[in-house]
Amino acid sequence: MSATIEPTGAVVEAEVPDDELKESYTHHSDWVYIKVAVVLAVLTALEVAASYVDLGSFFLPILFVLMAVKFVLVVLFFMHLRYDAKIFGRLFWSGFILAVAVYVIALSAFQFFS
């Protein structure tokens, strides 16, 4: 059963066949989520290890890449954006690209104008 909201604001209950629900979204096994969690743990360990190693000017770019990969993994798998409607994916990616551009511009402004 699913609920839809009419333009008048009324909530209407509608029967949705189980086959249609199964086709629209399938849950993965627990192992997929465990594998993603292990990858996130490894990436976090790399971030911590990077703080102990002298990487010079590569330190911040490496951290930003690791941070972005972790963020995307969490959003795609644990927030199920990978399986949602395409419009949500487009909104996410446009916001993500905009955020990265703002960070790059702000950090480069500190670098060049200090």
Image: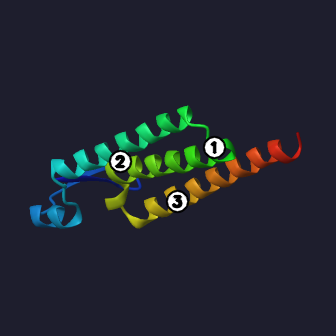
- Residue assigned mark 3: 93
Amino acid type shown at disc 2: Met
> How far from the left and from the top, in percent, is residue 89?
45, 61
Q: How many C-alpha atoms fall within 10 Å of the one at disc 3: few (<14), some, or many (≥20)?
A: few
Mark 1 or 2, which is nearer the eye? 1
**Count of marks overlaid on the render:** 3
Q: Is residue 8 above or below residue 52?
A: below
Tell me which residue sits at (46%, 47%) in the image: 71
Q: Nearer the viewer, residue 91 or 71?
A: 71
Tag 2 near tag 3, CB within 8 Å:
no
Q: Return the disc, 1 or 2, that comes first in the chain's sequence.
A: 1
**Residue 79: which numbered mark, if any?**
2
Label 1 vs label 2: CA separation?
Answer: 27 Å
Please give the label number shown on residue 60. Answer: 1
Image location of residue 16, percent across then percent down: 16, 61
Question: Looking at the figure, which quarter contains the C terminus?
Answer: top right
Amino acid type at image mark 1: Leu
Query: Going by the picture, which residue comes out furthest to the right?
Result: 113
Q: Given contact means CB atoms under 8 Å apart, are the residues at marks 1 and 2 in contact?
A: no
Tell me the CA gap for discs 2 and 3. Answer: 14 Å
Residue 37 spot, x, y in % from top left: 30, 43
Label 2: state its secondary structure: loop
| SS for callout 3 | helix
Tell me which residue sits at (55%, 34%) in the image. 51
Q: Quadrant of residue 6?
A: bottom left
Residue 10 rendering spot, x and y as whole percentages: 33, 48
Direction from residue 114 to residue 20 in the image, left or right: left
